[in-house]
Amino acid sequence: MKNILLLLLATMLTCNSYAAPLTHSQNYICLDQPVMGLPNVLEFFSFYCPHCYEFEKEWRSNKTVQNNFPLHSKLIKYHITNLGGEMGNTITRAWAIAMMMGLEEKVILPIFEGVLIKKNIVDPVSLKTVFIESTGIQAKQYDIAWNSPVIDALCAQQGKVARDMHLKGIPTMIINGKYMINSDEFDTSSIATYVQQYADLVQFLLHKK
């Protein structure tokens, strides 16, 4: 929780080889004005995006990515609100709770599956049920967090940064507040190849001067 609060405060104050050949300049966009205070790797996603779900599953299971580039230790995810109607805002709030409590890894696939596969997340009550079952926290903890001003701020921050970035699609990653990945030219013959190219480009951009 402390790390999330520090990250939020800082942001608000400042606003291997390739699986297939890539031309870097065609696959990332240099932001006109770098955004200071963002995490090194910031991903935008939605629980209502099937491609985001496949991306997350493959990223977790891709041994080459995990062995050579353990990105999950550095990756911060922001949930966008403009999919799913009002539930987009509701799930963004639940995701903010997961971020504050450090429970992202425990809830991300259960929520994805509840929304897209099992379809048992249909309202705030069912979302809360899945969240509690997947994390083991108490309902009272969830309710206190839900009404916290910290969660208000974190939800607002996710929305503001997403709007400021003028996203073209999701999943999208911003690297070092300077580069936005443009995956239009990636090899989409398989999700594994796509994810490997994504990871390689993130690694390249993290070390780019």
Image (cartoon, rainbow, N blue to C red):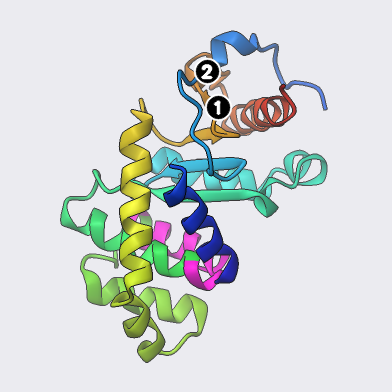
Question: Residue visible at 50% across and 84% down?
Answer: 136
Assess disc 1: are there few (<14), some (14-19) or many (≥20) residues with their C-alpha within 10 Å of its C-alpha. some
Which residue is disc 1 drawn over?
Answer: 178
Q: Position of residue 27 (x, y in %)?
A: 56, 16
The answer to which quarter of the image holds residue 150 is bottom left
Which residue is disc 2 drawn over?
Answer: 30
Q: Earlier in the sequence, mark 2 or mark 1?
A: 2
Residue 133's tag is none
Q: Which type of secondary structure does the marked residue at label 2 adopt? A: strand
The answer to which quarter of the image holds residue 143 is bottom left
Q: Pointer 2 and pointer 1: residues touching (CB < 8 Å)? A: yes
Left or right: residue 109 compared with residue 48: right
Of residues 146 and 209, the one drawn nearer to the viewer in this rendering: 209
Which quarter of the image is occupied by the C terminus? top right
Q: Position of residue 176 (x, y in %)?
A: 60, 34
Residue 77 shows in this picture: yes
